[in-house]
Amino acid sequence: MQSMLIIGEQGHADIDGAALIQIQDLVAHSLSFVMQELLGLWLGIARNVFHR
């Protein structure tokens, strides 16, 4: 988050605010999806281990 702000202040990134917000939303959704997948995977592994 901070690195994006720094890039914006230095003027290297010519992305407008709306696009930046969309990108952050996309990243957040991707992260939450990945975390859910990992959680499901770990729960499956734990279930298999405890059922033995």
Image: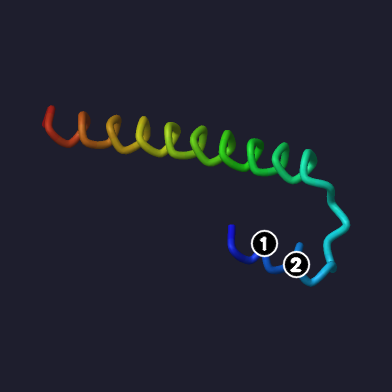
| Residue type pointed to by label 2 | Glu
Asked if the residue at tag 2 contacts the one at tag 1, i.e. Cβ–Cβ closer than 8 Å, the answer is yes
43 relative to 35 in the view: left or right:
left
Residue depicted at x 58% and y 37%: 30
The image quarter containing residue 46 is: top left
Residue depicted at x 78% and y 39%: 18
- Compared with 11, 30 (above or below) is above
Pick the residue in front: 29 or 19: 19
Mark seen at residue 29: none
Badge 2 density bin: few <14, some 14–19, many ≥20, Cα 10 Å: few
Residue depicted at x 64% and y 66%: 3
Residue depicted at x 45% and y 33%: 37
Q: Which residue is mark 2?
A: 9
40 relative to 33 in the view: left or right:
left
Q: Residue 34 location, x and y as percent?
A: 50, 38
42 relative to 29 in the view: left or right:
left
| Residue type pointed to by label 1 | Leu
Q: Residue 44 location, x and y as percent?
A: 30, 30
42 relative to 31 in the view: left or right:
left
Q: Residue 27 location, x and y as percent?
A: 62, 42
Pick the residue in front: 9 or 32: 9
- Image quadrant in which the N terminus is located: bottom right
Residue at the extreme right of the image, as rendered: 14
Gap in Å between the C-alphas at discs 1 and 2?
Answer: 6 Å
Q: Which residue is mark 1?
A: 5
The image quarter containing residue 4 is: bottom right
Residue at the extreme front of the image, as rendered: 9
Q: Secondary structure at mark 2?
A: helix
- Image quadrant in which the C terminus is located: top left
Q: Secondary structure at mark 1?
A: helix
Q: How many marks?
A: 2
